[in-house]
């Protein structure tokens, strides 16, 4: 890329890449022009010439898109929007969005979709215990399950344990019909769904039957030592401080733990969440990391990100009373 003060030229290595970068009927090109209205973009063959006050920034966008396409990344509307946002934030989408985590049953590859998700995945890989804290839709639980499946496939662990406080039933599950699996199924359904996404329904069923994957409410962790396991504690904002301490002291040799939660959705009685202010207590512990996600990491429908951002601006969790349910973070 050669640059002057006002003009930048990007040469894309191959016209076959150019059609993907520009999008069907140039829809990606038009989206970039809309994002940078003070900039003129001229495409000739495999050369893109940009002129205007944001020429250097737009040039970086095209460079990053070129690298993404070369890496096999699909440039849909959401990916394009994220890539532009990352470049604006002086980040490199070609680094963030191209790291494979695990290949799902349908052949698709799981990758981080935001810089926050990439930090989260890296933290899980590099630490024994990782806390992923953020609003709904940021992929906390889904990516944790993906990393668990990757660890199991690479034989880094021997089993996966999925747990969640059944606070909606006060952890008193005896009055519910069915065996243990039937009683806790509604509370662990988001984790089941993520597991099905990764390995397929049949393999997930087989893994559960052979106890390679174990699911249990948090109360059932008491008194156990969890060795050679990838343990995911979901919806951790609904633990009490005593439950959180109990859980964290279950960690055995060869294990990895991911704790996920959203402190804006606390259902625990009296609001005594074991996740709130926990970093103040554990911040100096080695091999333990806290990763905070926000509205910019939401990967659901655009309106979900807008709703999360609105709540973040208001600084409150309005709308009480709120229906308690199983949210897939």
Image (tube, rainbow, N blue to C red):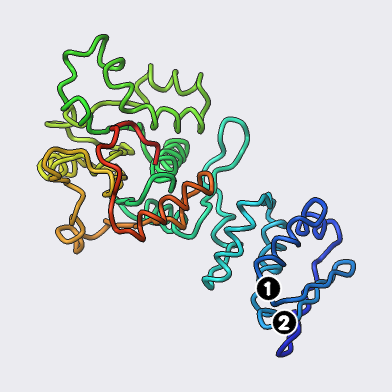
Is 163 rendered above or below residue 261?
above
The percent coordinates of residue 9 (x first, y second) are 78, 78
Is 70 rendered above or below residue 169?
below
Viewer-side label of 1, 2: 2
- Quarter-wise, where is residue 230 in the image? top left
Along the horizontal axis of the image, is 274 left or right of 123?
Answer: left
Q: Is mark 1 on a helix, strand or loop?
A: helix
Q: What element carries label 2?
A: strand
Quarter of the figure that contains the C terminus: top left
The residue that appears at 33% across and 21% down in the rendered structure is 185
In the image, 83 versus 27, the foreground residue is 27
- Count of numbered badges drawn on the protein: 2
> Which badge, 1 or 2, comes first in the chain's sequence?
2
Contact? badges 1 and 2 (CB < 8 Å): yes
Along the horizontal axis of the image, is 120 left or right of 48?
Answer: left
In the image, 294 versus 31, the foreground residue is 31
In the image, 108 versus 187, the foreground residue is 187
The residue that appears at 57% across and 56% down in the rendered structure is 97
Distance from the alpha carbon under mark 1 to that under mark 2: 9 Å
Along the horizontal axis of the image, is 327 left or right of 49?
Answer: left
The percent coordinates of residue 210 (x first, y second) are 38, 18
Q: Mark 2 points at which residue?
A: 52
The residue that appears at 19% across and 64% down in the rendered structure is 284
Q: Name the residue under label 1.
A: 58
Residue 254: assigned label: none
The percent coordinates of residue 24 (x first, y second) are 80, 50
The residue that appears at 44% across and 18% down in the rendered structure is 206
Quarter of the figure that contains the N terminus: bottom right
Neighbourhood count class around disc 2 (C-alpha, 10 Å): few under 14, some 14–19, many 20 upward: some
The residue furthest bottom is 5
Neighbourhood count class around disc 1 (C-alpha, 10 Å): few under 14, some 14–19, many 20 upward: many
């Amino acid at each position: 890329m050669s640059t002057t003060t006002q003009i930048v030229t990007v040469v894309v290595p191959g016209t076959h890449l150019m059609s993907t970068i520009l999008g069907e009927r140039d829809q990606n090109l038009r989206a970039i022009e809309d994002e940078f209205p003070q900039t003129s973009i001229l495409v000739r063959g495999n050369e893109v010439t940009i002129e205007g006050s944001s020429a250097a920034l737009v040039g970086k966008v095209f460079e990053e898109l070129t690298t993404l396409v070369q890496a096999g990344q699909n440039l849909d509307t959401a990916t394009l929007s994220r890539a532009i946002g990352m470049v604006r934030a002086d980040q490199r989408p070609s680094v963030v969005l191209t790291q494979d985590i695990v290949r799902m049953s349908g052949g698709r590859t799981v990758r981080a979709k935001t810089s926050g998700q990439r930090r989260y995945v890296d933290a899980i890989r590099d630490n024994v215990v990782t806390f992923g804290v953020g609003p709904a839709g940021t992929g906390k639980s889904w990516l944790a399950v993906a990393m668990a499946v990757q660890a199991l496939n690479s034989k880094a662990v021997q089993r996966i344990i999925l747990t969640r406080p059944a606070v909606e039933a006060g952890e008193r599950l005896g009055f519910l019909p069915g065996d243990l699996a039937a009683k806790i199924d509604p509370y662990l359904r988001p984790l089941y769904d993520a597991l099905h996404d990764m390995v397929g329904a049949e393999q997930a069923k087989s893994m559960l039957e052979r106890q390679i994957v174990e699911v249990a409410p948090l109360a059932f962790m008491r008194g156990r030592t969890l060795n050679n396991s990838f343990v995911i504690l979901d919806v951790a904002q609904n633990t009490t401080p005593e439950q959180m301490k109990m859980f964290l002291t279950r960690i055995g040799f060869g294990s990895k733990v991911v704790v996920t939660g959203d402190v804006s959705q606390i259902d625990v009685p009296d609001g005594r969440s074991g996740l709130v202010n926990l970093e103040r207590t554990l911040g100096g512990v080695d091999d333990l990391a806290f990763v905070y996600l926000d509205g910019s990491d939401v990967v659901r429908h655009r309106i979900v990100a807008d709703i999360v951002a609105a709540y973040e601006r208001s600084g409150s969790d309005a709308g009480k009373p709120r229906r308690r349910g199983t949210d897939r973070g």
